[in-house]
Image (tube, rainbow, N blue to C red):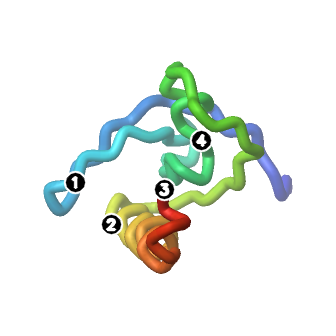
Amino acid sequence: MAFTWEPRWEKVKIESYGIVIHTCRDRITKMIACPICVNAAKTCLEQSSRTDYKPSYMFFFTPEDLIHHIRNYHAMRYLKKPLNEKL
């Protein structure tokens, strides 16, 4: 039994709660990757990325789980910063 695997990405458009997210999904496991954590623009969407950082992989089984992750981790972290640091 293997503890790791090499993901085979495919582009996917997720629509849930009126939110549209373009991200990556593994073809084999069907797990959805967080587009911010994985840097989806560079990983599977074949777009240029403004930032170059080492991706940290966060995977989810449902679109709702992904939306909750983005709302609670990425959006709230941005909103908690002082106003002068946001720019």
Q: Of tags 3 and 1, which is closer to the observer? A: 3
Q: Residues within 10 Å of mark 4 (few under 14, many from 20)?
A: many
Could you tell which of marks 1 and 4 lies nearer the N-terminus?
1
* Cα–Cα span, label 3 and label 4: 21 Å
Q: Residue at x 60, y 29 (%)?
A: 42
The quarter of the image holding the N terminus is: bottom right
Q: Determine which residue is flagged by label 1.
A: 19
* Cα–Cα span, label 3 and label 1: 25 Å
Could you tell which of marks 2 and 4 lies nearer the N-terminus?
4
Amino acid type at mark 1: Ile
Q: Residue at x 53, y 50 (%)?
A: 36
Q: Determine which residue is flagged by label 3.
A: 87
**Helix, strand or loop status at disc 3:** loop
Q: Position of residue 46 (x, y in %)?
A: 52, 20
Could you tell which of marks 2 and 1 lies nearer the N-terminus?
1
Amino acid type at mark 2: Glu
Q: Of tags 2 and 4, which is closer to the observer? A: 4
* Cα–Cα span, label 2 and label 1: 10 Å
Q: Determine which residue is flagged by label 2.
A: 64
Q: Determine which residue is flagged by label 4.
A: 39
Q: Is residue 54 left or right of residue 73?
A: right
